[in-house]
Image (cartoon, coloured by chain):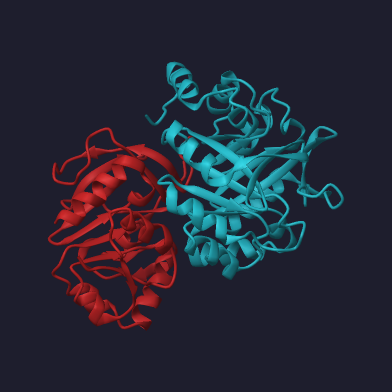
Amino acid sequence: MPARRIIPCLDVRDGRVVKGVQFRDHRDVGDIVEHALRYRDEGADELVFYDITASAEGRSLDTDWVRRIARVIDIPFAVAGGVRSRDQAAACLDSGADKVSINSPALERPALIEELARDFGSQCVVLGVDSMAEDGDYFVHQYTGSVERSRDTGLRTLDWIREATERGAGEIVLNCMRRDGVRTGYDIAHTRDVASAATVPVIASGGAGAPEHFRDAFRDAKASGALAATVFHDRIIAIPDLKEFLAGCGIEMRH
Amino acid sequence: MKLAIVDVGCGNIGSVGIAFERFGLTPLITADAEAIAGADKVILPGVGAAGFAMEQIEARGLAPVLRGLTQPVLGICLGMQLLFERSEEEDSACLGIIPGRVRKLAPAPDRPVPHMGWSRLSVADPDLGLADGDYVYFAHSFACDDGGWTAASADYGRRIPAVVRSGNYLGAQFHPERSSAAGARFLERFLER
């Protein structure tokens, strides 16, 4: 594997960075470009920007802020939020994004995955999956950006990931919803199950609260990357310290 | 300096253009044969699928122009793969400037495909602006054959050509525009050629 990736996730609303707990109660935490630059300088390996309300509001994300970010940073970044068509994805890539992450729209119309993979290649197509533990299994939730519309699709997470990767998704961001924002650690067992079943890279998401949680995601769950928001935004964990700790655990880190 | 970025109708033209703007250049994004032939340096970008990109190149009548360039040319990611003879991706004929093929990477445990992320380089050619051990960013499912043209490589189950060089043609499998300081050094050295 390449060096394992530390990936700060920035939730975006109206071009500002916001953060909620279990997908609710979002508060403004600052300017998007300032955050992008700060993380780049601290050694983040990649960034993800989610326009959290785009999908639920039935629109695609605003490429204005994508351009602003692309201009200032020289590390890869993915964007997400309401991308429903080939042309909307092309607009994101033309604006300087390296990858487009799709979630609810891929559930509405799975052929979207194939359309994007065909024209842009699988490496540009990230599938975001909001997975919720229920009755001993995991199920995919949709429209999680909106409290009113959020719903259980009834699809088993592993089934959906198999279908989506066969259609051409090149990476999975696995958001374990019960862990989101609570800082008790990633769902290691679920992430490991997904990473073992998928042939594409899997990014652990939801629950990071301590450096050991990142270690477990890489060492025990075999994640290619680990995504986190709160611990970075609130400066609970500094990325240089985190990378030093992980390298000390024998995990390859970019330096 | 006139820098032309070949508009293949898809891909990472946005971020490649911005990377050169950081050097104070104003790249010309164009599909015009004369503008490409008359540029001091030519960039063949590409994120996407080989078949789609070659269709775009053929539709614009650019294949003979791209084959005949004598100024420094840099293919990036898919743009590097297009320099080779053929790609397994949709079994596409490519430009045939470098005599090898492009093959699908096979996934294995602990080695998912696409190869996505920062890998360390082994650098054979000291004139690339890159150093042994530099980390650069990869995002690809297909890789070029390893051969005499390999100037730097990464390990992904086998030796993956990270930079290829053949005469005035240079190719980077990684994304220099997204590879932070190492990527900037590589682009800067290309601009000096």
Give the colour in which the image draws chain B: red
Please give the letter of the chain rendered in cyan. A
In the picture shown, does residue A195 fall above or below B44? above
Q: Quadrant of residue B63?
A: bottom left
Q: Is residue B193 visible?
A: yes
Residue at 30% x, 81% y is B32
Report the number of discs: 0
Q: Quadrant of the C terminus of chain A?
A: top left
Residue A16 percent location from the top left of the image: 64, 47
Q: Position of residue A228 (x, y in %)?
A: 61, 33
Q: Is residue B112 left or right of residue A137?
A: left
Q: Quadrant of the N terminus of chain A?
A: top left
Position of A92 with respect to B74 (left or right) is: right
Q: Is residue A176 left or right of residue A72?
A: right
In the rendered view, would you say B161 is above or below A118?
A: above
Q: Nearer the viewer, residue A67 or A102?
A: A67
Instruction: Say which residue appears at 19% left-offset and 50% top-offset.
Output: B189
Which residue is drawn at the image coordinates 59% and 45% (left, top)? A172
In the picture, residue A163 is in which quadrant? bottom right
Q: Is residue A122 at all visible to an observer of this figure?
A: no
Position in image of residue A20 (x %, y %):
74, 37
Point 20% across, 56% down: residue: B191
The picture quadrant where one finds residue B190 is bottom left
Residue A115, compared with residue A16, is above or below; it is below
Camera-nearest residue between B63 and B193: B193
